[in-house]
Image (cartoon, coloured by chain):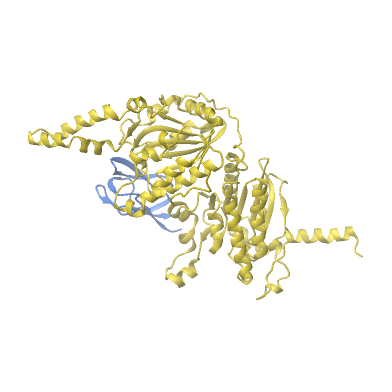
Chain colours: A yellow, B blue
Amino acid sequence: MVDSREKLQQIETLRAEIKQGGGEKAIARQHQRGKLTARERIDRFFDPGTFVELDVFAKHMGRDYGLDKVDRVPADGVVTGYGKVAGRTVFCYSEDFTVIAGTFGEMHGRKIAKTVELAMKHGVPVVGINDSGGARVTEEMGALSQYGQLFFRHVRASGVVPQVALIMGPVAGGQAYSPALMDFIFMVDKSSHMFIAGPPLVEAIVHEKVDEQHLGGARVHATISGVSDLTAKDDDDVLDRTRTLLSFLPANNSEEPPVVPTEDSSDRSLDELLDLIPADSNQTYSMRKVIKLMVDDGNFFEVKKDFGQNLIVGLARMGGRTVGIVANNPQFMAGSLDVKASGKGCRFIRFCDAFNIPLVNLQDVPGFLIGTKSERDGIIRHGSKMLYAYAEATVPKITVVVRKAYAGGYLAMCSKDLGADFVFELPTGEICLMGPSGAVNILFRKDFAKAIEEGRDPAVVRAEKHQEFMDKYVNPLYSAGLQHVDDIIDPRDLRKRLISSLELCRNKYDPVPPKKHGNMPV
Amino acid sequence: MGKESVLLPMVGKIVSVDVATGDVVEEDQQIGTFESMKMEMPVFSPYAGTVVEVTVSKGDVAEADQVFCVVETD
């Protein structure tokens, strides 16, 4: 008979061994690659001493091709459990690249799927740290099936608890769809990559020679594919920024985001804003500056910064409460909405709506992007996502017409007609059915023809008619007169007015007809 | 590290080119201006590094995704 103390001793010895992961050499190699180990990442991510590990004794299922001779695969290559982030519970799984390259076997997959399931059941966010060589081929159907189990849980948990994927090494093959089904993907520059098939397979099948970074590195996904939401400079940076992201979010969809008191007064006057926005609508300015001036302590957590740059989206606080900001960026493509920006905006709006985050929309939009390329890319199909997302959202929606608000762009950036609770216009606002120049061309074409006949300068006539049109229709007094905007406000009062309206909307009740789900254009 | 192309986001006319071959640029530094949709817009370099080739000139009409310049990254 082994007495219970001895038994305990054996178990604890084994636990300590397992916590060594792949051993000294493998850990040294991980560090040489500029990466922390799975457990170091967990230690740095959670509040000290709060992490509780589950399934540490999970055993791998490999029976063939040498895996039967591997006496153990510590924790089956993934550390799972829960801990506290700034005092709030968060579930986490962290793949251990030092253990047979963090490959995804059956038990490994079961552990991750269970983590997502527990997070959903208990209503807390889940953060997935991905660092894996891909599927463990020797576990065949066991691995494949667990991918499916995991995807199913991500989808079930979608809109219930926030799900954040950190790409801190390779993610290859089917596993790439796990982060893709979560809410945010943060990647580490240079040390991470993500693709459905790696360079050797790509070369063999489609005869293309490419390296890992150009196929699916952090920059590619942040700028071209739009898969990634943020590029961090190293492991510590990505973990820090994840903690910051979570600070803005509620634990689940039945809670409100946490309130973070601030010294920044709700009445603060935005004096700089008065001169920041040029009256000449052909001149650009920094919309990010407008946002930073307006929000608490200038603190703006932007996501997808380098993708669809004509639209700026991110989280901030106003009066201590989280808001989602959606703003046109006149410095890029004049702020027009194209396919990329529409998809980016739609996804962000729906995330905010799912997690009770009010939306603040800043308009300076000349419309949807026109032209052959845009039409062939499907701007009708993709652009409609913005309309869908705003109309669908039941969180408070406050819109500010900063300058241009032309045509479909005005509706797609949440006018009253799309359900905005309040619309404010700055004195520089220009709401118009179509770009004023185009409207003038149609409306006064006979006047221009007549001017030419009579030998007058058509440019002079055009300038006159343009001014007449602007005075008549394209100015804040016209739109306010028709109650499309609730007020024309002094730019210096923007912060004060937004906070006051957000406060008013806090108990907004906006029932929707019962349905399974809508059919959003995708 | 490698050569990266800075691309123009949309069709437009080059108003200014503010860098030359050999210039060192920082990430998000303005390297030129182009005009489209009646707006003059800045062109920023998404990369830090050294400009090894400038592929447009003032007055050029550029296509979407046309290369503005090539930067050898640090």
State the residue in front, A158 or A238.
Answer: A158
| In the displayed structure image, the side of residue A457 where residue A87 appears, left or right | right
Placement of A17 over or under A356, stated as above or below: below
Name the image quarter holding residue A105: bottom right
Residue A330 at x, y percent in the picture: 37, 39
Residue A147 at x, y percent in the picture: 59, 62
Quadrant in the picture for the N terminus of chain A = bottom right
Residue, far left: A454
| In the displayed structure image, the side of residue A287 where residue A243 appears, left or right | right
Placement of A434 over or under A139, stated as above or below: above
| In the displayed structure image, the side of residue A191 where residue A466 appears, left or right | left
Number of labels in the image equals 0
Residue A390 at x, y percent in the picture: 45, 40
State the residue in front, A317 or B20.
Answer: A317
Name the image quarter holding residue A129: bottom right
State the residue in front, A375 or B24.
Answer: A375
